[in-house]
Image (cartoon, rainbow, N blue to C red):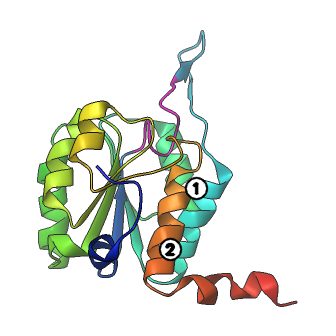
Amino acid sequence: MNTSIDQSMAEKIKPVSFLILDVDGVLTDGMIIIDDLGNETKQFHVRDGHGLKLLMRVGIEVILITGRTSKVVEHRARELGIQEVHQGAKNKIEILRKIMTKRSITAEHIAYIGDDIVDIPVFREVGFAVAVADASEDAKEAADFITGNGGGRGAVREICELILKVQNKWDTVVSPYYSA
């Protein structure tokens, strides 16, 4: 497990052109709220969403793979412009391999953020495996990198910024915010 970037870690990040994310516990804090009528709600961090938009602006594709199925996830993905969402994923590694085959990409081009033992097989397959700060201990042990922030609390933004900075794209993507 690692929480800092050295040269070997940077080498894992440089070729990343796809960021694949789990949802519950990564884009959210893992809490699922269900009201008396059975309506589900989730909470998303606005800066995580903005980080994903920054990645997409420089051509890094974002894909969601989640074990649960929720209309909330569909709405959030649409709002962010995420085109590919896999819900009800009982076998994430199988979906990952289909994505790789469909796009003719190798594992080194993929970063994946997860939070639990179901993500470990994917961690073993991708080029850069990330566990959020409040992930299960097993997930943290299997990851290349552990965020400083928890799921749904800025962890995704942290990784978006890390990828952009290591790939020397940060200044370009944020420059419009500094010029007026």
Residue in the picture at 21% in, 46% down: 142
Front-lying residue, 57 or 140: 140
* Number of residues whose C-alpha sits closer than 10 Å to that of mark 1, classed few (under 14), some (14–19) or many (20 or more): many
| Residue 96: numbered disc | none
- Identity of the residue furthest to the top in this view: 36
Report the magenta stretch's main SS: loop
**Of the residues shown, which amino acid type is indicated by label 1?**
Asp
Query: Whole-percent x and y of residue 176?
Result: 74, 87
> Is residue 15 shown left or right of residue 152?
left
> Which quadrant of the rendered structure holds the C terminus?
bottom right
Task: Please tell me whether mark 2 sits on a helix, a strand or a loop.
Answer: helix
Q: CA distance from mark 1 to mark 2?
A: 11 Å
Question: Secondary structure under badge 1?
Answer: helix
Residue 15 picture location, percent across and down: 29, 81
Residue at 26 percent of width and 50 percent of height: 143
Residue with the mark numbered 2: 55
Question: Which range of residues does the magenta coloring cover?
Answer: 23-32
Residue labelled with disc 1: 48
Place of residue 68 in the rendered image (x, y in percent of width and height, measured from the top left): 34, 33
Does the stretch in magenta take in 1?
A: no
**As rendered, which of 25 and 69 lies closer to the eye?**
25
Amino acid type shown at disc 2: Leu
Q: Would you say 67 lies left or right of 37 here?
A: left
Residue 71 visible in the current orientation:
yes
The reply to whether residue 81 is visible in this rendering is: no
From the viewer's perspective, is 177 left or right of 23?
A: right
Residue drawn at (43%, 37%), measured in percent from left and top?
24
N-term mark: 1 or 2: 1
In the displayed structure, 32 sits above or below 167; it is above
